[in-house]
Image: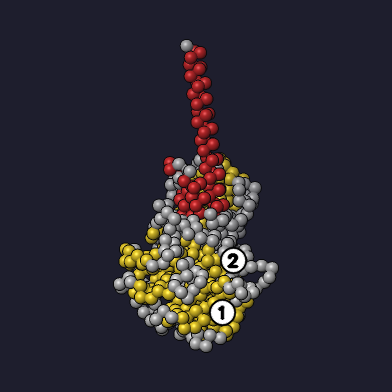
Amino acid sequence: MKEIVFSFALLFTYLFAYSQSIDDQNIQLNKTRYAAAEALIQLGRISEAKEFLAQIPESERAVEWRFLMSAADQSKILIEAEAGITGNDMALSPDGKSLAIAMSDSSVTVYQYPAMKILHKLRHHQSSVSTVCFSHSGRLIASGGRDHTVVIWNLKSGKSTIVNDSSFSQGIYQLRFHPGDDFLGIVSWLRDKSRDPGIFGYLKLMDTESGKIIATKELDNHPAAGLRFSPDGSQMILSSWGELVYGIHTNELHTQWTFDLSDPSAYNAFHALDLSPDGQIIAAGGADHAIYFINASDGQLLYKSPDYLGHKKIVKATSFSPDGNLLASSGADHQIIIWDVESHSIIKRLLGHTGTVTSLIWTDHNSLLSSSTDGSIRTWTLDVGFLNRYKICDYGPWQTPLASDHQFFATPCSDDKLQLVSVIDGTNIHEFAGHDGLCAIIHPNDSSVYLSSFDGNVKRWQPYENKIEILHQLHKERVDGIALLPTYNQVITAGGNKIIVWDEVKKDTIRTIKLDQQPFRLLAAVDQKHIIAGMSGGNVVKLSTGDFRQIATLQTGESIQEMALSPDGRLLAVFSGNDIYLIDYKTFILLFRLKGHTGSGYGLDFSPDGKRLLSASGDQSLRFWDITTGECLLSWKGMEKEYFNCKFINNEQLIVTTGSGELFIIKLRP
């Protein structure tokens, strides 16, 4: 009998160890999948990234999975891919109510927008339609295709009014109506064996009433690819695959200037061209992956995006926003990049397409349409995408205390910009100029913000009363830590080598605690029975709030930069140097030392369910940790600047800040 019991014990032990081994294998396998998906997203290989994410079982998909899925696809699909059919070009009618798409199935499909109900399926072309546009009156649509044909259609009837299939010997690259709608500009190319070289691009002007060619201008020995008219129609901007952009007088057809990138050692065809709404700036993109901002009046280069910034493959489309402040660009790397036209900085990268993004249209100053060789038509809204960037100050914020309703946070900064900032859209809700800050905390009733700074003054800001007052000036040096015990009306601050406990009701000091090391950060326990002090010398100290005696200490070895408590108060996370220490709060015993960051960090927060720890570091990575195993499940390296703070707002939203005043609101799919 003893032998049977012993055998069952061995079997149970074996099965338990085996199950643990399987669990460990699954964790490692998922980590590998996350790492592969993250790397592929950074490379713009979205379809491959989604394949790795799809391999993770649904029961094991947590916040890090939703983070990567949101990073991989930030769009809303208007038209699903249909086998073998793609949209090559798009045009939106002047009134915004009709969307025309040049299709690879030889049709032009016209939709009612935004309902996306098909109005017309225009058919006359014999092969793929490459370009489409609306007249400025909105009555006509023009299309050009690889069948060497230009067709003009009546939008209302869906019938063709003009067909020109005799004036072109090669495919039509692009066409546009002149602002007066009296003629079309058309760019294409010609092969002539009697000439050397035998290929040259050209512009033709076609009368919209008769369909006759009324003017022709040869360009260079490469296909002409892009065309735009100035707002008043007096100038045409053309581009070619010969690394050339032209400014051409519309009436006289003489060349006003040429922007020439010709280089015998390298070939850089211009595939993308757009002109700002005011007619002042040209945006061209091509085979060298760069965006060129060019002065439309003289053809002088204003800015070229450097090799390390922007697209990784050929640029296929550029499009200015209606107000001209932003530029959208896209291409063979499957991504859409939003540029600030004035500063030439990147505002946002939009990922989701799994093929070359061939066409872009702004529907308003905040929304885009895109078409791709993946067959889908997608819409994007800039302020509800995955990663939304806002500027809130120049130096800071050094902490991001969050309101109890999770609708806003405070921004203690070094440049006198004390604000409450909305976590919904990054807007400034309240501001009190002239006050800097190094640390801050918001009262649980959200009525007051407590802060301190370089001067050692401890202040209370009541934003809704537009009032700020000094509570005390007992610190003679900078104050880096602040905590509240609202039940006891106490404000606790750390500066120099002491902690000061201040009674708000009596307006007096309750206690001054002198320490061997300089305290840097303070935390109040969930039940307010303890205060945690993180020291610059590396000690983490627990003090009772009854008599403020030290009851536990843990040594990390390096200065403490930030601390966080889990929602249930069971765990304490401490960022010390490059590492994070996960501590059992009750026993003050170290559970895990989380290694992986290669730079010190000030960003630390637990997920709302307490299952994950989020960290942000100067190594430009954002990491998700499993608190039960101490494993780093995901390291996100998609930022171009150093992270500083990070916070879970809720299960669908994170905020991350830099030390240079930038706020990133990250929105996750449910």
- Residue at 54%, 81% (x, y): give it: 217
The image shows residue 434 at horizontal and vertical percentages of 51, 73
Q: Is residue 18 left or right of residue 139?
A: right
Q: Residue furthest left?
A: 157
Q: Count residues near mark 1 (Cα–Cα under 10 Å), then give few for <14, some for 14-19, many for 20+.
A: some
Q: Residue furthest bottom?
A: 252
Q: How many marks?
A: 2
Decide if residue 367 is in sight here: no
Decide if residue 374 is in sight here: yes
Q: Nearer the viewer, residue 14 or 553?
A: 14
Q: Is residue 261 left or right of residue 622?
A: right
- Residue at 61%, 51% (x, y): give it: 597
Where does label 1 land, which residue? 218
- Residue at 36%, 79% (x, y): give it: 137
The image shows residue 294 at horizontal and vertical percentages of 57, 77
Label 2 SS? loop
- Cα–Cα span, label 1 and label 2: 23 Å
Q: For the residues carrying marks 1 and 2, which lies nearer the camera in this image?
A: 1
Mark number displayed over residue 287: 2
Q: Nearer the viewer, residue 665 or 84?
A: 84
Above or below, comparing residue 284 to residue 610 in the picture:
below
Label 1 SS? strand
Say what amino acid the circle numbered 2 marks.
Answer: Ala
Q: Residue furthest front?
A: 194
Above or below, comparing residue 188 to residue 552 in the picture:
below
Label 1 vs 2, first from the N-terminus: 1
Q: Count residues near mark 2 (Cα–Cα under 10 Å), then give few for <14, some for 14-19, many for 20+.
A: many
Mark number displayed over residue 491: none
The image shows residue 631 at horizontal and vertical percentages of 55, 43
- Residue at 45%, 85% (x, y): give it: 232
Say what amino acid the circle numbered 1 marks.
Answer: Glu
